[in-house]
Image: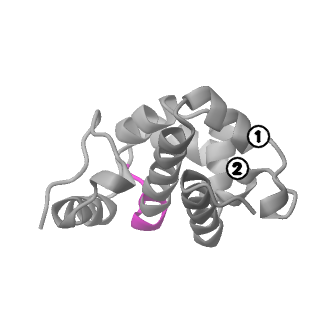
Amino acid sequence: MGQALKIGDTLSYKLIDDSDVFMLISTVREGIKYALFQSIADKSPFSTTEWSGFLHLSERTFQRYKKEKRKFDPLHSEKILEITLVYNKGVEVFGDKANFDAWLEAKNVALGGIKPKELLDNTFGIGLLKDELIRIEHGVLA
């Protein structure tokens, strides 16, 4: 099977081919080390509180993972990668991190009047955001 993701690797939907998919599968199965998660979190606009909500983990559990240099289990690892992929897609579509961050914080009519980042706590919401970003990318606005 492929190698796991490393700190500094960039994730993007458009770069994913079969070998990248195997890298993602391997990373999920091995579990994301806290150091890799921290690298990902530092590039995102989300606080530890928001990440704990997205992953359904307490902030205390996050502190313990950091202190013990633990790995996230496969379910949490997969969610971290899904959020990272959709975030990077958003930055790509909006052409600018600040513009996408503002979009994530603004109530969105096409998404039922909620803030897009409120959908990052489950796979269905992440998929909905990805679909919406693809519509925006192709100029199909709801």
Give the image location of residue 140, x and y in percent.
Answer: 64, 61
Which corner quadrant of the image does residue 125 belong to? bottom right
**Residue type pointed to by label 1:** Glu
Indicate which disc residue 52 carries: none
User: Seen from this angle, which residue lies furthest bottom?
Assistant: 124
Which corner quadrant of the image does residue 109 belong to? bottom right
Query: Which one is in front, 104 or 62?
Result: 104
Circle 1 is placed at which residue position?
Answer: 105
27 lies left or right of 74: left
Q: Can the viewer see residue 91?
A: yes
Sequence-first tag of 1 and 2: 1
Near mark 1 (Cα within 10 A), the count class, few <14, some 14-19 or many ≥20, is few
Q: Name the image quarter holding the N terminus.
A: bottom left
Q: Name the image quarter holding the C terminus.
A: bottom right
70 lies left or right of 21: right
Magenta span of residues: 71-77
Give the image location of residue 36, x and y in percent.
Answer: 36, 39
What is the distance, in whole Å, between disc 1 and disc 2 at their CAs?
A: 7 Å
19 lies left or right of 85: left
**Residue type pointed to by label 2:** Lys
Residue drawn 58% across and 48% down? 61
Residue drawn 79% across and 50% down? 115
Asked if 65 appears above or below 15 in the picture, the reply is: above
User: Seen from this angle, which residue lies furthest front?
Assistant: 139
Mark 2 lies on a secondary structure that is helix
Give the image location of residue 70, x and y in percent.
Answer: 39, 46
Asked if 43 appears above or below 64 in the picture, the reply is: above
Indicate which disc residue 117 carries: 2
Give the image location of residue 133, x and y in percent.
Answer: 58, 55
Residue drawn 47% across and 58% down? 82
Are the two marked residues, 1 and 2, in contact with CB atoms closer than 8 angstroms? Answer: yes
Question: Is residue 89 part of the magenta span, yes or no?
Answer: no
